[in-house]
Each structure stands twice: as C-alpha cells, then as structure tokens.
Amino acid sequence: MAHPVPPPPLSDAPLAPGLYVVATPIGNLRDITLRALDVLHAADLVLAEDTRVTGKLLSAFAISARMERYDEHAAERTRPKALAVLAEGGRVALVSDAGTPLISDPGYKLVREAWAQGSTVYPIPGASALLAGLSAAGLPTDRFLFAGFPPPKPAARRAFLAELAGIRATLVFYEGGSRLAASLADMAQVLGPREAAVGRELTKLYETVTRGTLDVLAADRQFAAPRGEIVVLVGPGREAAATAADADRALADALTRLAPGEAASEVAKALGLPRRDLYRRAMDLKGAGR
C-alpha cells in the first residue's frame, strides 16, 4: 500500500518585493507547484477570493499567512491595502479559489494599478481549467479563444455566440452546471454541429471529458444539471472555399512584396489553393501591371 508523501520543505530564500499572481489547484491539491508554496509561505499578505477555501489549501501544506478577502465584492475595499503593502516594499500574493487568477476571476485592476505605482508583478504559473480542458479535448490548439462565461439569459447568450461564430479558432467557455444544458442547446443552434468537448471535475476523482458534436452533446442527459463549473470547448467551423476574387486580392497584395513564385507559395498556403494555378495567375497579374 502506498504511503502519503509528506509536503516538500519550504524554501527560506528571500522573496523579492512585488505582487505575485499565484495559480492554485483546480481540484487535486498535489497540482500546487513548489514555487507557489514558497511564495505563499513568504508573502506578507495573501489576497484570496474566499479565505475559507484558501485557508484549507494553506493548512494542507502547513502554511500560515495573513489573508484578506479579494473578490468582486471586497476588491474596492481591499485593493488600497494591498497597494500600500506593495508601496512599502512588501510581498503580496493573489490567489483565486481554484486555478489561475484573472481568468474569469478578479485581479485585473490590482495588476494594472500595481504596475502603475511602480511595483513588479510576477506570474507564478500552474493549474488552469482552460488549459487542462484544451489539452484533453482533442480539438485544434494552434489557435484558440477563451470567451469566459456566456451570458445567462437566452437571447443575450445567442447574440454572444453569433458574434463568435466566424472566428477561426477553437472556442473555450466556462459554464455553471445549472446552465450547461441550455448553453449547449444554444451553441448547437447558433454554431451548428461542430466538434466539441465538455470537461467536468477536471483533476478530481470523477473527472470526465466527453467529446462529440454540439448537437449530440446538447441531447446528452448527463448534462441536464451537473454540479460545479464546467469547461466547454468548441472546434472551429468549416471554412468556405476561397473564390477567384479572394485569390486575386491576395496575389495582388503579395506581388507588391514578392516575386511571382514566392507570392503563389504564400497565397497557396494561406488559402489552401493549388500553387500551380496561383503561379499562372500571378504571372498574368504581373504582366497586366507592366
């Protein structure tokens, strides 16, 4: 039988003054990084979205720290205190309940004002539901857009999705369990039967990643009212074939910078059209421009 591994010893190395944006586990506590533990141990002040949640994390690793609540309700009151600590050369750690701060969590104004007053901001990377979902979804990762939480009301949600429909990237959303079914239905209606994935309980005991087209996922009864927050990932839609006019515009632009052969290669890669045909057309355009 495996025995529990004790927490690693914390570093006593000096911590430079500044604001530390510290990622915390999204489920499994062992996803905390050694550097995050060192920062939380040495910080003069820890800003926590919920001090009870962060208190449990700190207790698990035998860390005691001065904490202040920093969420959407307390931020205006707490931010001046944190900036004052930073101005005096202190070390402030910002954490959310789970994952990387500022990703659909408070913190943007604090980071902005810390920089404005001359304090240094240090990212302490780690767990992120966004990246965890993206890494397991089996959807294109060369380009993606994090769109946050869709609006809760149906009409606003559909308008929001319509604005994203033409983006050539994998779309990533966070959603609450109570609204998941309605959101999937609207995504299927607005975005069509694209490839998609739903990640639940990521890094936890009952972690699941379910893949399928949006219409199939919208009809899946397991998503009627699941608990917790969910990551929904939607693959890019199919691109319409480029027209001859599209090719001519792209070639005309490329020919201002490149020789015909190079221009044809560039446009072929960008539009997915045969280079041979594009080269002949580039020569025609080059001749017509003489």
Image (spheres, grey):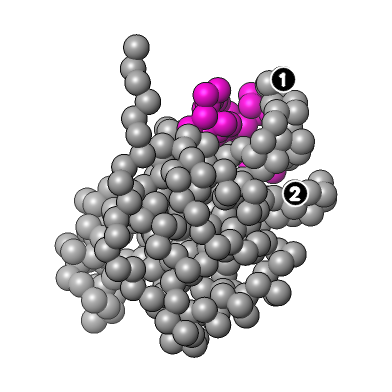
Instruction: Report how far apart the C-alphas of labels 2 and 1 lie in the structure.
Output: 21 Å
In front: 24, or 106? 24
Identity of the residue drawn at 57% across and 54% down: 96
Quarter of the image containing the C terminus? bottom left
Among the two numbered marks 2 and 1 on one chain, the one whose residue lies closer to the N terminus: 2
Q: For the residue labelled by badge 2, is the local secondary structure a helix, a strand or a loop? A: helix
In front: 66, or 68? 66
Identity of the residue drawn at 35% across and 34% down: 6
Q: Which mark is residue 165?
A: none
In front: 247, or 69? 69
Looking at the image, residue 95 lies above or below residue 182: below
Q: Is residue 199 magenta?
A: yes
Q: For the residue labelled by badge 1, is the local secondary structure a helix, a strand or a loop? A: helix
Residue 260: image location, x then y, percent: 19, 67
Looking at the image, residue 186 lies above or below residue 123: above
Identity of the residue drawn at 61% across and 77% down: 81
Residue 230: image location, x then y, percent: 62, 38
252 relative position to 226: left or right: left
Q: Which mark is residue 158?
A: 2
Residue 142: image location, x then y, percent: 37, 49
Q: Which mark is residue 221?
A: 1
195 relative position to 289: left or right: right
Identity of the residue drawn at 50% across and 48% down: 58
Q: Is residue 279 visible?
A: yes
Looking at the image, residue 67 lies above or below residue 52: below
Q: Residues within 10 Å of mark 2 (few under 14, many from 20)?
A: many
283 relative position to 116: left or right: left
Q: Is residue 131 visible?
A: no
Magenta-colored span:
190-218
